[in-house]
Image (cartoon, rainbow, N blue to C red):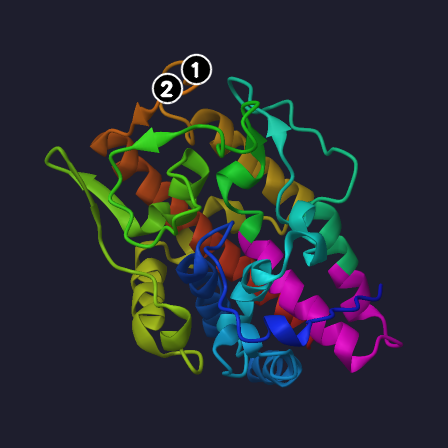
Amino acid sequence: MKWRLLLPCALLGLLPVAAQAWDAAGHMLVGEIAWETCTPKAREAVRELVSTIDNHFNHGNPYNFVTICCWMDDLRSLPREQYLWSKWHYVDSEKTDDGKDFKLPEPPHVVWAIGENLKTLKDPAATKEDRAKAVGMLMHWVGDIHQPLHATTWNDKGGNGYTIMGVPFSDTLGRSSANLHTYWDKAFRFDGKDGQIFEMWKSPDVEHRPKAAGETIIAEEAAKLMKQFPRESLDELKTKGTAEDWARESHVLGCTKAYPPGDHPHDTEVRKLEPEFVHQSQEIASRRIVVAGYRLGELLNELFP
């Protein structure tokens, strides 16, 4: 599959807007965990490919194994009509009580996108440019597909129509509303305790992203998560599974855990999140990031044996 990414000169200096999946920190955690589990050959192959991708949206720094996971959200700085991948981030299936009725809709969606990128990376005739873009996309989509509200909607665009309050976001932009989807993008960085909701740590801005794997707060937090959720403790990893299986896992969590108890807010109603809900969500989101990182590492080891 071919991609032609055109960046008009007038746009090259723009900085990215807020991410629309896991936030930048979440995607970099997935990349860091994958890096920790990858072979030296896979690490070097990814580094060589992604370092060729246009870095104007990464503060002029070459993309590396960790920061490339943010690339597809960085490109949201492009005008809406030039951002061609909006539907590739998710695979929404309507919420039910138990999530057992998950069905894939017609593509494009994130399950299809992962398949397309894998085809390119396994194609010996693919150019280096196409392989670089494919691996950059793949490393982002594997993160996206593990976020519960990237596989679930309650007639609200995956929680984007579910307005919330009570979460002290420090990094939402003026045009970003406080909604349930935005919360789940960052849920791994928030906790609830003693009746309070608080941000445990902040996502690095673009300028202060790690210049290589193993650096900054991203490496520190990834190490904590891997200690909290060691690979052998994760039942999800006992079978390999497919991208559709991963989406189904997220959908079940989206249906049973991602929405606060009760009915859906009506019209302009704003729902206040409770500390207990935030505490539970923090553990779920953290586990999904670790699972995504392990799975991404395994994929890359297979692609670059």
Residue 151, position in %: x, y?
58, 37
| Residue identified by numbered label 1 | 266
Q: Position of residue 41 (x, y in %)?
A: 61, 84
Distance Cα–Cα, label 2 vs label 1: 5 Å
The quarter of the displayed image where residue 177 is located: top left
Residue 129 is one of the magenta-drawn residues: yes
User: What residue is rendered at 45% in x and 48% in y?
Assistant: 288
Residue closer to the observer: 12 or 240: 12
Give the secondary structure at mark 2: loop
Which amino acid, mark 1? Answer: His
Image vertical order of residue 150 relative to residue 127, above or below? above
List x then y, in percent, for residue 164. Answer: 34, 31
Residue at left offset 59%, top offset 85%? 44
Is residue 217 left or right of 90 when viewed as pictured?
Answer: left
Could you say which disc has been placed on residue 269 in the image?
Answer: 2
| Relative side of 255 to 261, left or right | right
Amino acid carrying label 2: it is Glu
Residue 35 in percent (x, y) is at 49, 73
Q: Which residues are magenta?
A: 117-143
Question: At numbered mark 1, what does the secondary structure look like: helix, strand or loop?
Answer: loop
Quarter of the C terminus within the rendering: bottom right
Image quadrant containing the N terminus: bottom right
**Of 295 and 202, the residue lying toward us:** 202
Residue farthest right in this picture = 125
Quarter occupied by residue 139: bottom right
